[in-house]
Amino acid sequence: MFKLKKRPIKGEKPPELYNILENYTDFDPPGNVMVCAMAGPENLEFHAKILAESYDIPLEVMARLLTTGGVYLFAQTGGLITRGLFACKVDPTGQTPKQTWVLDLVQFAEAQQLAVSAGISLEEAAERVFYRTLPPELQERLRQKNLGLDEKTLNSQIAKRGDITYIDFRKDWSPHFKRKCLMPDGTLIETGSLKEFAHVHSITPEQAETLLREGGILELGGGEVLACQIINNQPTVARFNARQYAKAKDIAAAQGLHIMDALSEMAFRDPVLGRTIRQSLPAD
């Protein structure tokens, strides 16, 4: 008697959000962005869902912005403006790709002043302020069709999709960009969304968001600690066990260092952590 093997049921593959990624995060802030583009048709529902989750904007508002364009001003917190604005530029003729970006607080203030002084809309002012901060090379490429990309250098599966339909200029911690965290044993683990990061480290999403936005340290149970440095607006995270944290506090006390500097000093001295850090540094 023969047994029939059942083929495993494959999970439904999520829609593709980007198929072209270009890194400009080494450029001086605030123009340090990741260019995330889609060659081929836009899945509006999925695109809106991901951006709404990434930027904490109501889904219906994001869907409208991606359809008609415009700006969204983040709500005030405790009477203070703590975030800038989200913008979406839509070309009604379809000649240029849809583009989205975020202005930080300084850029937002600059856009407001420009709107008043030049007598233009906040939407137009936000566009001017954002584009002039981008790397000159990127500014030039944005004036070319499909970012000036040569189809011969693109993956054939991407090239045959057609023109670029949208570009998201991103800096945020998102499920679509895995960032690494140095662990106490010297391993580097990758996490994407804030929820995933919070789950891995057994903290709340609110604690994760604050740490990754503001940097600093977050003490955990058992004497462990999470440390985050913001470099070029990008969070770099490491977790230290109780022994490592205690060593860092001793270094801080002995040398009069800030605890973040002491943690870095301790990590480089540690034979395991130091090796991992040196291996991850870019070559000269």
Image (cartoon, rainbow, N blue to C red):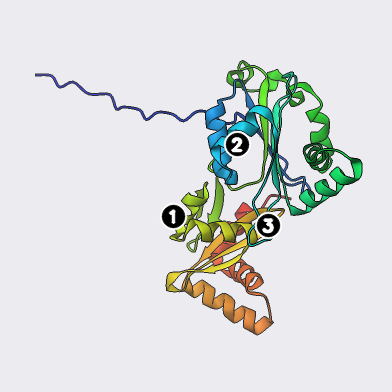
Question: Residue 123 falls in which quadrant of the image?
Answer: top right
Question: Image check: 231 left or right of 5?
Answer: right
Which amino acid, by three-letter code, is at mark 1?
A: His
Instruction: Please rate how many residues cluster around mark 2, counting C-alpha atoms within 10 Å: few if below 14, some from 14 to 19, many from 20.
Output: many
Instruction: Please rate how many residues cluster around mark 1, counting C-alpha atoms within 10 Å: few if below 14, some from 14 to 19, many from 20.
Output: some
Q: Choose the circle earlier in sequence order: 1 or 2.
A: 2
SS assignment at label 2: helix
Question: Which of the labelled discs sits on residue 62, or is there none?
Answer: 2
Which amino acid, by three-letter code, is at mark 2?
A: Met
Question: Image check: 135 left or right of 233?
Answer: right
Q: Are marks 1 and 2 in contact (CB under 8 Å)?
A: no
The one nearer the camera, 85 or 32, is 85
Question: Image check: 61 left or right of 120?
Answer: left
The one nearer the camera, 61 or 270, is 61
Q: CA distance from mark 2 to mark 3?
A: 20 Å
Q: CA distance from mark 1 to mark 3?
A: 26 Å
The one nearer the camera, 185 or 214, is 214
Q: Where 26 falls versus 169 (above or below)?
A: below
The one nearer the camera, 95 or 90, is 90
User: On the rendered image, what quadrant is the N terminus found in?
Assistant: top left
- Which residue appears at 43% of the width and 60% of the height? 202
Which amino acid, by three-letter code, is at mark 3?
A: Thr
Camera sees residue 237: no
SS assignment at label 3: loop
Q: Which mark lies nearer to you, 1 or 3?
A: 3
For disc 3, the marked residue is: 82
Q: Choose the circle earlier in sequence order: 1 or 3.
A: 3
Q: Tell me where residue 7 appears, x and y as whole percent.
A: 28, 24
For disc 1, the marked residue is: 199
Q: Tell me where residue 268 appears, x and y as whole percent.
A: 62, 66
SS assignment at label 1: helix
